[in-house]
Amino acid sequence: MSKKSSAKHTSYPDFLKELLEAKSPTGHEFAAQKVVDDYVEKSADKYSKDALGNRIAELKGNGGPTLMFAGHIDEIGLIISHVDDKGYLYFEFLGGHDQVIPSGRRIHILTRNGPVLGITGKRAVHLLSPEDRKRVPERHDMWIDIGVTNRTEALSIVRIGDPAVYTDGPEILRGSIGVARAFDDKAGAYVCMEAFRRLSKEKNLAARVVSVATTQEEIGTRGAQVAAQGISPDVSIAVDVGHATDHPDADNRKFGRFTLSGGPIIARGPNINPVVYDQMIEAAESLGIPYQIGAESRPTGTDARAIQMANGGVACGLLSIPLRYMHTPGEVVDLAVVEQSVQLLVEFACRVKKKQSYSW
C-alpha cells in the first residue's frame, strides 16, 4: 500500500489566483485590469489609467525620489484573422509562441457576448506523410473548430479580431509549486501590486511609490514605455519571470544556473543600474531571502529595457521569478519565491532615502 504524501500544499493568494484566471491577451487586458482595480485602487493615494490600458497606483511618500514598480498583465494569445467557408477559424499569434504547442488545445475566444470554447486543430498524425510527421506545423496549418458548419454561422458567434487564450487555470502541483498559464507575467504584476498594497500601510515612506500594471509587454514593452514617460521615475524595478534551468536538457553553460525554488533572480548588466543592484542585494540579505544572480549582457526582454531609456534615463533594477516552461499553458513557479519577491520589493522601497542618488 502506498503512503499518502505528507507535503503541505500552499494556497494561492486570492489576488494572484484571480489575476491568473483573468483572460488578458496582449492588447485585450480588460479582465486583468478589473482585478487590479478591485484589489489596488482603494490602497492608493492616486489611481489612474492611460490610453494603453496601464493601471497606475501612487503613494505620495515624503519628498523622496519617485520609485516605479512595473509588472505586465498581458499574456500571449491568438487573434482571429480569417474564417473559411466551412466555419473554421484561422489565427495569428499575439506574442511569441512555440509552434509545437498550439494544436489540440482548448481555448476561449473572447467575444462581445462572452467566452466561446474552441479547439485548435490540425491534420491527425495518422493522415500525415512520414516527411510531414517530422515537420513543425506552420501557423496556417492549424485552425480553430467551434463546432459550426459554415462561415455565416461562425461569424454570427465570433468576429475577425477577437482574441483567444488557452483555458488552463491555476492549480497546485505539489507543496508550494504552482502551475498555470500566464504566470508570465501575472506573477510579476501581482508582486508589484501586492508590495504596493503593503507599502500603503507604511507611515514613514520617503519615496513616492508608483506601481504600474503594464500592458502590451509581449509585443514590445509598449505599456511600460508610455507609463515611464508619464511618471518620469528616478528609479524603477521591473518584475518579470526568468528561466529556471534545473530541468532536463537545460545546458547551464548556455543558459546559466537557476533553480525553481532558489529565490528570486536579481539581474546584473548594462540594463541595470549598479546602485540599484547593490541595494537590492542589501535588501534581500537584510531579510534573509535567498537570491540568485542573473547576468544580462544587453537590454533585457522585459519592461526594464523600455523604462531605462525614458526621458533623461532611469536607474533600473530587474527582479525575475524563476519559471519552467515559459509561454506554454503549463508554466510552473514556486509560490514561496513569489512571496519572497513581494517582501524584497517592500524592503527595497522602505530603504530609499529622501535624498537618494542613483548616479554613478
Image (cartoon, rainbow, N blue to C red):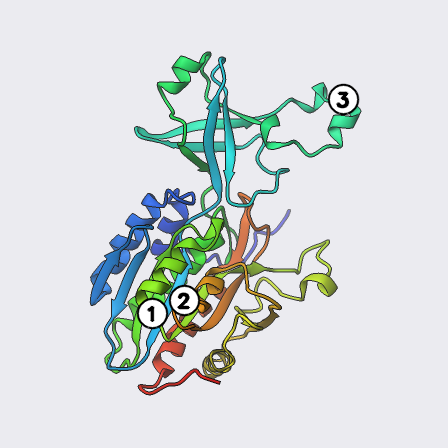
Pointer 2: what residue?
310
Lateral position of residue 191 relative to residue 292, left or right: left
Residue that sits furthest to the right in the current view:
130
Kind of element beneath mark 2: loop
User: Which x, y percent locates residue 312?
Assistant: 40, 73
Which dot, 3 or 2, sits closer to the camera? 2
Spatial CA span between label 1 and label 3: 57 Å
Which residue is rendered at x = 44% and y = 60% of the image? 188
Pointer 3: what residue?
129
Pointer 1: what residue?
232
Spatial CA span between label 3 and label 2: 52 Å
Say if mark 2 contacts mark 1, CB within 8 Å.
Answer: yes
Q: How many marks?
A: 3
Which residue is rendered at x = 64% and y = 22% of the image? 123
Given residues 147 and 302, the one toward you in this image is: 302
Say if mark 1 contacts mark 3, CB within 8 Å.
Answer: no
Which tag, 3 or 2, sits closer to the chain's start?
3
Quick one: label 3, few (<14), some, or many (20+) residues within 10 Å? few
